[in-house]
Image: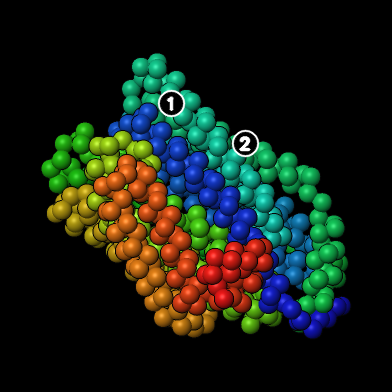
Amino acid sequence: MRKNNNAGTKGSAVSMFFSGVVILTIANIMVKAVGLISKIALNRVVGSIGAGYYSSAYEIYAFLYVISTSGLPVALSIMVSKSRARGRFKEAKRIFDVAIIVFLIIGTLFASMMIFFSSSLADFISAPKTVFCIIAIAPTILFVCLSSCFRGFFQGYQLMQPTAISQFIEALCKVLVGVGFALWARAQGYEDHIVAAFTILGVTVGVLFGMIFLYIKKMLFKDKKINEAYLLELSSKSEFCVLEDNGCKKTSELLKELMKIAIPVTISSAVLSLTIIIDTFMVQSRLLAYGLEENLVRIYYGDYTSLVISMCNLPTVLFYPIANALVPLISASFEAKDYEGSAKIRSFSVRVINMIAIPCALGLGIFSYPILDLLMFKTDSVERAAPWLSVAAISVVFLGLISATNAFLNTAGKQNLPIVSMIVGASVKLLFNYILLEKIGIYGAPISTVLCYLSASALNIFFTVKYVGKLPNIRKIFGMPLLCGIASIGLSAAIYLGLSFLLPGKLATVISILLSVFGYVLLIVKTKTVTKEEIALLPHSEKILFFLQKFKMLS
């Protein structure tokens, strides 16, 4: 047995945490950039109606994807990190072996269901022609299940590079293969729903190639040296006794533990995804009840999903990696009884998420038209979607809070509580969709989405304070990022209005956004919303501090 003195644990843990965050963030930015290119191409090549067919099939896939992959990777990463924290490396291998069989069974089951029930699913969402898109994307469920198993294993080792690279491979294939197929299908003169089906094949091919990369990476993975180095570090820092690597739990026990963690997380995530499914079948049917003709309903739905939902999901690329990296790290901290270190990570992470989400929401809300126009979506689509985006942008703040608090509750063993929050949120979404879409048209969709995430995040915060620990100073978490965001976006809006008389609109938008980002960082530092000591915890902090001091942003 080995003991430790806990020296330097917190700084090392936080630094390791943000190293993983940086890797995932950079990768996700690249993935989202490629994905955005795909959306723009979809809007221009396939058109609003074809985009509606694409989105309808994709959201059905996304819902089944969440059910099949959201809980097990989290459970896998938690269990692997805990086994490693105890020095039980054979058990970590056994956990993966059990998980891969479970993932294979689930992936095969859901992929088969999508194929066999494709016609029923298409009828259910009031879009019968979507059937070809559903069949084209169905095999992806199996591929992504296996990919998720590999990712959960690597994340349990706090190795984020394989996940990052595989995600980029998926995104790149999605745009290259998908757009290539779309152009070919359009050139052949196929109808919109067939062009959309060819386009969605890019997703299937991309996930297949990403899975192949992860499989090769796992086969070449040499864990012996990593485990030896980790055990040496653990023995000098952990307060509890580390067991020798002399065995592991039975397969049945591991499977039971895996399911105990995975099922609540899956249900919670499925309910969150269910809000999108609610839009998928409800927006179109309720808009028909509102009195719109069918063709216009398809156009509205295509623009809403391709432009509004896509743009609201973009900021998540910056804060979801923080939530993802929290899970294995805090789990390992709990096992090491480093409660002060895990509390420090929670505090800093929720503040960072708010510092990202709040200005993003303000920027998307105020600059909705210039941003969509800058991204070269079709002009008529931009004119329709910009007002909807201004409303939906508010939800970005609540999405950030949900991502952070879900991670806190999951690692604290309170996996059931996010389920309650999201059931309440989905119920709010369902109720207000039903009422508002028939009364005020398409604006009912973004309004009900905002109310859904507001309800869920409020409950999650309540549960976090009650069962995990008090949140840091509210003024510092919410107040200062909001004030700094309003000031920087307000200045940026004034600059944009001035420049728009002198420069082309797109150039004025770029300059205004860059000045807004610079002004926001300056305000965040000057108001000490983030301190010098906290910046020092980040990877490559020396360069960051040098830059801030050189430009007199930090004394």
Judge whether residue 545 can be spotted in this image: yes
Please state the horizontal and vertical placement of residue 161, each as a whole percent of the image: 67, 51
Residue designated by label 1 = 182
Which of the marked residues, 2 or 1, is nearer the chain's N terminus? 1
Q: Which mark is drawn over residue 209?
A: 2
Residue 84 picture location, percent across and down: 76, 66
User: Residue at coordinates 38% horizontally, 21% vertically from top-left?
Assistant: 186
Image: 241 above or below 105: below
Could you tell me the amino acid type at mark 2? Phe
Image coordinates for residue 349, horizontal then vertical, percent: 54, 70
| Residue shown at the point (69%, 80%) measured from the top left | 337
- Residue pictured at 60% horizontal, 36% vertical: 208
How many marks do you count on the picture? 2
Q: Closer to the camera, 314 or 287?
A: 314
Residues 555 and 429: in front is 555
Residue 387 appears left or right of 271? left
Q: Hey, which residue is sitting farthest top in the picture?
A: 188
Image vertical order of residue 97 relative to residue 82, above or below: above
C-alpha gap between disc 2 and disc 1? 19 Å
Query: Up-down: is 240 above or below 305?
Result: below
How packed mark 2 is, by other alpha carbons closer than 10 Å (few <14, some 14-19, many 20 or more), is some
Q: Secondary structure at mark 2?
A: helix
Query: Mark 1: which amino acid?
Result: Ala
> Residue 504: x percent and y percent?
32, 41
Look at the numbered disc 1 and give the secondary structure of its residue: helix
Nearest to the observer: residue 104 or residue 240: 240
Instruction: Please state, as top left, top right, bottom left or bottom right, where the N terminus lies in the image.
Output: bottom right
Q: Which mark is residue 515?
A: none
Residue drawn at the location 52% of the way across and 31% of the way down: 176
Q: Is residue 61 above or below residue 519?
A: above
Tell me the quarter of the picture where residue 478 sits. bottom left
461 relative position to 337: left or right: left
